[in-house]
Every structure is written in structure tokens, then in C-alpha cells.
Image (cartoon, helix red, strand yellow):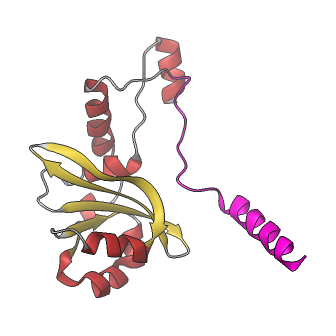
């Protein structure tokens, strides 16, 4: 829809990571912000953010990784971590078990994607001049689709059997 409107109006667009948009749900938070979206198979889509001088700062760019790798990484930081996103309902108990009091969880009102967070992230990018043409706007996938991963796994196993 955005691409169509931008094309018709001949205006630029900005691409916003949903993970960054979710970090805006917790404005001026004093802790590390770690949005997690369930990627299945004990993995999450994640990025790590921190508010600094009234601005959100990306500590770690969006990626797909195992929950264990994420926990190990976050335990190395000096601050408590606030988790939010649909991955919380899947991994909350495990995160609490591994991180203890260092793990905090966003309230229900701030846990999911919100238009206001998306708008705030988009405005920041726009103000920074990070606009692109509607023709350049495309999704960024953090890992290959499951069907493609399974096909590669089958090929690998077939090669090993030879």
C-alpha cells in the first residue's frame, strides 16, 4: 500500500525494521530493550536497543539466532534487559530461568507491534534523510524460508549418503 501511494504521489519512503519500531514502545527506558519475535525451533528474530539522550540507539542489528545465544550475549551486558514481542510468550519461563532478575518483561500494553512505534521510527529515519524511492523498498528477510532450509538440508543429507 505504501509503495502504491508513494508512487502515485511521487514521494520518498523509509523502510522500518519492526524490531526497531517495537523498541519505541518503551520510550526513555533505562534498561536494554530486546524485542524478540518467535522464529520457531528455539530461535528468535531479535535486535537490541538502548535509549541514550532521548534517542534510540541500536546496539545489535536485526538477526535470527537461538534463544541460548541471545541469552549468553545479553548476560554479558551490564544492565537489565526488557523483553517484548510475541517471542516472550514462547520463551519467557526459559529466559527467567537463565537470566534471573536481569530479565524484565514489557507490560501487555507495550508488548506487541504498534502503529505509534512504527511512526516514531519512520519519522526518525525521515528526519535523518534516510529516504528511498518506492521502487527500492523491499522486505529484508533475516533467514531463508523454512521450505528452502529444509530443501538444503535434504540435499546435504543426500550428498553425505553418497
Say which quarter of the image contains residue 14: top left
Q: Is 136 one of the magenta-colored residues? A: yes
User: In this rendering, would 44 be left or right of 109?
Assistant: right
Q: Residue furthest top?
A: 10
- Residue occupying the point 34% across, 84% down: 93
Q: Residue furthest bottom?
A: 97
Which image quadrant for residue 88? Answer: bottom left
Residue at 23% across, 66% down: 82
- Extreme-right residue of the structure: 162
- Point out residue 155 in the picture as x, y percentages from the top left corner: 81, 67
Report the label total: 0
In the rendered structure, which segment of residues is drawn in magenta? 134-162
Q: Nearer the viewer, residue 139 or 98?
A: 98
Residue depicted at x 32% and y 34%: 122
Q: Which of the image's four quarters has the C terminus?
A: bottom right
Residue 29 place in picture, x, y as percent = 14, 56
Q: Is residue 136 above or below residue 71?
A: above
* Residue 27 visible to the viewer: no
Residue 4 at x, y percent in the picture: 54, 23
Q: Is residue 136 above or below residue 90?
A: above
Image location (x, y in percent) of residue 76? 25, 72
Is residue 146 shown above or below 91? above
* Residue 100 at least partly seen: yes
Residue shown at the point (52%, 26%) measured from the top left: 3
Note whether 77 is above or below 95 in the view shown.
above
Amino acid at each position: 500500500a505504501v509503495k502504491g501511494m508513494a508512487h502515485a504521489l511521487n514521494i520518498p519512503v523509509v523502510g522500518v525494521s519492526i524490531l526497531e519500531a517495537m523498541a519505541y514502545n518503551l520510550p526513555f527506558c533505562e534498561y536494554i530493550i530486546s524485542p524478540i519475535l518467535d522464529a520457531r525451533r528455539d530461535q528468535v528474530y531479535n535486535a537490541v536497543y538502548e535509549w541514550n539522550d532521548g534517542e534510540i540507539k541500536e546496539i545489535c542489528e536485526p538477526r535470527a539466532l537461538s534463544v541460548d545465544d541471545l541469552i549468553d550475549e545479553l548476560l554479558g551486558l551490564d544492565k537489565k534487559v526488557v523483553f517484548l514481542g510475541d517471542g516472550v510468550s514462547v520463551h519467557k519461563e526459559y529466559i527467567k530461568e537463565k537470566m534471573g532478575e536481569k530479565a524484565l518483561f514489557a507490560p501487555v500494553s507495550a508488548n506487541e507491534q504498534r502503529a505509534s512505534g512504527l511512526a516514531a521510527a519512520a519519522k526518525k529515519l525521515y528526519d535523518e534523510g534516510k529516504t528511498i524511492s518506492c521502487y527500492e523498498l523491499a522486505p529484508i528477510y533475516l533467514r531463508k524460508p523454512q521450505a528452502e532450509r529444509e530443501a538444503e538440508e535434504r540435499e546435504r543429507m543426500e550428498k553425505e549418503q553418497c
